[in-house]
Amino acid sequence: MAQTKSIYTCQNCGAQSPKWLGRCTSCGGWNTYVEEVVEKKKSTSKISVQLSGNQPLTLENIKAEKNQRFPAGINEFDRVLGGGIVPGSIVLLGGEPGIGKSTLVLQMALGLPNKKILYISGEESLQQIKLRATRLEMKQNNCLFLSETSLEHVIAQTEQTMPDLLVVDSIQTVSTEVIESSPGSVSQVRECTSAILKFAKKNDVAVILIGHINKEGSLAGPKVLEHMVDTVLQFEGDTNYMYRILRANKNRYGSTNELGIFEMRGNGLQEVLNPSEQLISKVSDDVSGTAIAATIEGIRPFLIEIQSLVSSAAYGTPQRSSTGFDLRRLNMLLAVLEKRAGFKLLAKDVFLNIAGGLKINDPATDLAVICSILSSNIDVAVDHKTCFTGEVGLTGEIRGVNRIEQRIAEAAKLGFNKIFIPAVNKGFDASAFNIQIEKVARVEEVFRIIFRK
C-alpha cells in the first residue's frame, strides 16, 4: 500500500524542504513554500527486465524524415525558431500580461491552412476566442478550439484528433487529478508539462505552451520547466510602444541570437520586415545628441538611433540613466571619454536612450554611443547621413566587429553617405559598396573628423 507524506515546494525555483520555511534558501523568495502531498510506493527487491521497449540504434539507422520542420506561417516566428516548427518539439512562449502572446499564437494557428491544429484555452471561452479571431480578420477551418483545464481531458482530445500542432494557453491553468495542489502550483505545472512532453515525443506532435511571467520578470514555475522544453521564447516590449520583440532564450534546434520584430496594430501583429526604416527617426534636420549605429542581431543587420542628453547636474550627485543599453557599459564609456579623450563629464547628468524601446547588447554600438554623448555635450549635431559601428576599448582604441560587410551593405541600402568602421576590419572590397567608408583606429580620430567644422 502506498504511503503518503507532505513536502514543501518553493513556487519560484522548485526547491523542496521537509518543513515549511519563511524564506527559500535557494532563491531567497519570501512566503513561496506551499505544501504538497506525495505518495511513496513500496519498492520491491526483485527487478523485472523487459526488452520489448526501445532499442539502441546507430546514427545510420535513425530515421530523421519525420522530424522535418514545417513553417509556422509567420516569417519572424520561423526566423527565431531556426527555420520552422519541429514535429515532437515543445516550445514555451513567455511574456508579460497583455503583451500579445495569445494574439501571436492565434494568428499563427489561423495562418496554417494545411495543418491540423488543436488550440486549448484555459483562460478564455470559445466565444472570446472567436471575438479575437474576428478582430484578426482571419478564417481557418483546420483549427479546432477547446476550452478545457483538465489535463486528462486535454490528452484524451489530443489522442482523438491527433493534430500536427497543439497549443496550450496557458500551462498554468491546466491541472491534473493526480496532484492535489491548486492549478498553477509548481507540482501541477511540472506534472502537466511532463505528461504533455511524453505524449508529444511519442506521437511527433509539436506543442506550443504559453507561460506567464512572475514579478521578477522570469517565467513562472520552477526552472526545471525550462529544462524540460526544447525551446524557450520570450515575447517582450513596452506596452507604451507598438513594437514587440521575440527572442529565443533556449533553442535546441537553432540559434539563440535571432530576433523577431512585430508591430502591434488593431488587426493583430504585423511583421516588421525592415526594422531599420522603422527605428530611425524621419526628421531631416540635424539635432544634437543623436547618432545612428549599425548593429546585428543573429544574422539580421539593422540600424538603430542612439539618443543622448548631457546637461549640468542640478543636484550634488550627477545622474546616469540608460534605457535599452547596459548602464555599466555606459559608465565605462564615460570613463574612457574622461581619461582618453579629455572630455570632462564628471559633473554632468547623462541620459541615454535606444529609440523604439529596443534592448541592444551588441558592443559594436559603443562608437555611436560616445558620439551621441559628445554631440549633446558640445551641442553640435552629427550628420544624419552618417552611421557608426565599432567597439570601444578601455585604452580608447576602436576594436573590430564581426560581419562588417553586412553592416556596410545595410547602411548603403538605406541611403547613408558615410560609415565609420574600425581600421582593423580588413579583407573586403570597399568599392563594392555605394557609401564612403571611414576607417578609424581611436576615438580621437572620430571626434576630429565629425566635429572639425
Image (tube, rainbow, N blue to C red):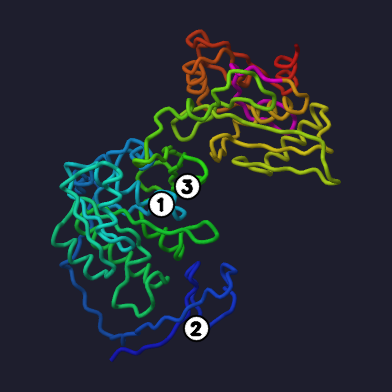
Answer left or right for 84 relative to 289: left
Residue beneath the point at 48% across and 80% down: 8
Q: Nearer the viewer, mark 3 or mark 1?
A: 3
**Residue 15 x/y as whole percent:** 50, 72
In front here: 392 or 415?
Answer: 415
Q: Residues within 10 Å of mark 2 (few under 14, many from 20)?
A: few
Reply above or below: 392 against 164. Answer: above
Q: Which residue lies most toward the top here?
A: 431
Q: Quadrant of the N terminus?
A: bottom left
In front here: 368 or 198?
Answer: 368
Give, as a three-letter code, the residue at label 2.
Pro
The residue stretch that appears in magenta = 381-398
Q: Which residue is mark 3?
A: 236
Q: Which residue lies most toward the bottom here?
A: 1
Q: Main secondary structure of the magenta part?
A: loop
Q: CA distance from mark 3 to mark 1?
A: 13 Å
User: Image quarter for residue 453?
Assistant: top right
Residue 18's disc number: 2
> Judging from the image, what secondary structure is the residue with disc 2 in?
loop
| Nearer-N-terminus badge (3/2) | 2
Reply above or below: 248 against 2. Answer: above
Q: Which residue is mark 1?
A: 232
> Judging from the image, what secondary structure is the residue with disc 3 in?
strand
Give, as a three-letter code, the residue at label 3.
Glu
Residue 258 magenta: no
**Residue 132 x/y as whole percent:** 30, 50
> Judging from the image, what secondary structure is the residue with disc 1 in?
strand
